[in-house]
Structures are given as C-alpha cells and as structure tokens.
Image (tube, rainbow, N blue to C red):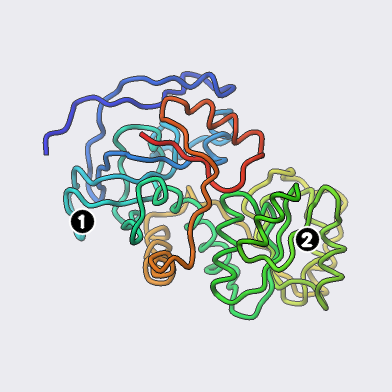
Amino acid sequence: MSLPAHMRFVDLPHFGAPDVMTIANGPVPVAGEGQILVKTQSIGVNRPDVAQRQGTYPPPRDASPILGLEIAGEVVAIGAGVSGYAIGDKVCGLTNGGAYAEYCLIPAGQALRFPNGYDAVKAAALPENYFTVWANMFQMAGLTEGETVLVHGGSSGIGTTAIQLATAFGARVYATAGSQEKCDACVKLGAVRAINYKTEDFAEVIKAETENGVDMILDMIGAAYFEKNLASLTRDGCLSIIAFLGGAIAEKVSLAPIMVKRLTVTGSTLRPRTPEEKRAIRDDLLSQVWPLLDEGKLAPVIHKTFAFEDVAEAHRLMETSSHIGKIMLAV
C-alpha cells in the first residue's frame, strides 16, 4: 500500500484554551518494531487530552507530543516483530499519544479488533475507558460477582463503562451524577440507585441503602470525596482513585477507618504503564469483555461526534461536563 508522505494533525503550538489547537501538516509516522500504523477514521476525546492541552498533563518522554490516546481505523503498515495483523484490518487501540492525526502508531499489544457490527466511531469509543476500568476495578481492586460498587461520575465515559461492566459481571452498582438526566442515564445502564451529588449526600445515601457500605468505590474526584469515600466502604473494602478532579491533597482527614475497617486504597494512571502491562489488560479485554460487546450486552455511550476540524468545539464541550458518555472526532 502506497502511503502519503504527509498528513494532517492537531498541532498544539502552546498551552491554553481550546482555540490554541490548529490543524497542521506533518510527516506520516513510520511503524517501528512492535508497532502498527493505522489510518485514523475516528478518535476518542478524553480528559487527559484537555489536561495536556492546558499544560497540566505532560506526555511521557517517549510518547508522541500530538494529543490523543485512542483511535479506530485501518491497518496500513506493520512494523518488525508484529504478528496477528494484516494490511486492511480494522482495529481500535490505546495509543501512547498521536491520536489526533490522520495516521497514528499503535503498539501491537494495545490494539483490538472491532467488535461485531461496530463502525469506527463506536470502536474508537472503547479503548481508553475499557483499559482504565478493567485495570482498576477488576485487576487491581478485584471486583467480583455479588459485590457492591459505587461509581463516581457515573455519566462520564469512564462512568458509563464502569456501570455496564460491573453490572455485566454480577456486581450491584450505585453511581453519582450531577443532574436528574444524568442519574436517569446511570439507572438505564444498570445502576440500582443513582445519587445526585448536587442535592444529596452520597455517603448518607449509601449508609441508608446498604447494610455496612459498598465493597469498592471507583473515584475520579480525589481529595474532596476522600473522607466520605472511606465512610462509605464496608470492611475489607477498596477505594480505587483514578483522577483528582476534586483536588489531590486531602487535609484533616482521619485515616482511622482504613485501619478499623481494613480498607485498601489504590490508585493508578494508565499512560505510564509498561507495554507488557498494557498488553495484559488488552488480552483480558479480548477474552472476557469483547465477547460481551460482540453480543450487544455492553456498548459505548456516545454523546456527540465532531468533525476532525472541530476539535476545539469538542474540547469546549468536554470542559462543560454537560455530556453523557463519550465525545468523538470523525476523520
């Protein structure tokens, strides 16, 4: 397959508001060892993209400086040492940066086939959320059938994924969200109770709804919720922190519940994980989650799809937090 020498990509000449991003031209990347080159058809927009644009989330040194962490498209070149892929394959994948471009490199261990019946937009809505939720809820926190879980930010891309996955694997799910519309969406996805954090105290609701609290909490708020999260966990419960939208420094918080209730507090970021760790997550997803997507038992929630050229509008929508589910770009 003959490839062009140049491609369009979203340039970030300096940090700032969404309007600092521009469409520029640059060289098409070359597939190195262990990589596949994908002609991008759709891109997922994520909170880390916004943070990187603002200058608060620098990419790893070996990552592309171009924004973006997930894509879907067609394999157009295969690097040395890669097996299991052919030119023309439709794949989605977790990138190490570089997704906001017409061509993007994906480490072969971070690529996944399209689920049955999926187009590129639906497929590109999967990798970042499913990698994150599987790694934190299932691999690290060990959520199992019959347990209870509280998902904060239940209407976000991460939240809608977590509710569906936890429910599919037999957990009882509670969720928080910031409006009645968002709460209704959480219940529709499988939550047994959605808590409007603007009008209700989630810790009080969990206390009233459960006998001793939940077994696990997936939290993207951080410091602002830390004390109430500890209060909402049952004995041997686990708090899994994946972001700090409510701050990273918790002051004057009693740590006694951690000892008294034998709690576990974990946290992780996905991007700095090793290729081997990401491959292990990918393999779990292919064997345990992709069959559920194939059967229609799970599906991404897509709020709106923007044209590639309207990336600034997509970021502005992300910053309003008014969306339910994923924000996408179509190339």
| 130 left or right, relative to 98 | right
- 147 is higher (above) or lower (below) than 38: below
Front-lying residue, 201 or 141: 201
Q: Secondary structure at mark 1?
A: loop
| 100 left or right, relative to 263 | left
Q: How many C-alpha atoms fall within 10 Å of the one at disc 1: few (<14), some, or many (≥20)?
A: some
- The C terminus sits in image quarter: top left
Front-lying residue, 312 or 279: 312
Identified by mark 2, the residue type is Asn
Residue occupying image coordinates x 32% and y 25%: 8
Front-lying residue, 71 or 57: 71
Identified by mark 1, the residue type is Tyr
Q: Position of residue 57 (x, y in %)?
A: 56, 36
Q: Position of residue 200 (x, y in %)?
A: 86, 55
Q: Position of residue 26 (x, y in %)?
A: 29, 23
Residue occupying image coordinates x 16% and y 49%: 87
Q: Position of residue 141 (x, y in %)?
A: 60, 69
- Ranked by sequence position, the earlier of labels 2 and 1 is 1
- 220 is higher (above) or lower (below) than 293: above
Q: Secondary structure at mark 2?
A: helix
Residue farthest to the left? 1
**Can you tell which mark lies on residue 297?**
none
**Can you tell which mark lies on residue 85?**
1
Residue annotated with mark 2: 229
Q: How many C-alpha atoms fall within 10 Å of the one at disc 2: few (<14), some, or many (≥20)?
A: many
Q: Quadrant of residue 285?
A: bottom left
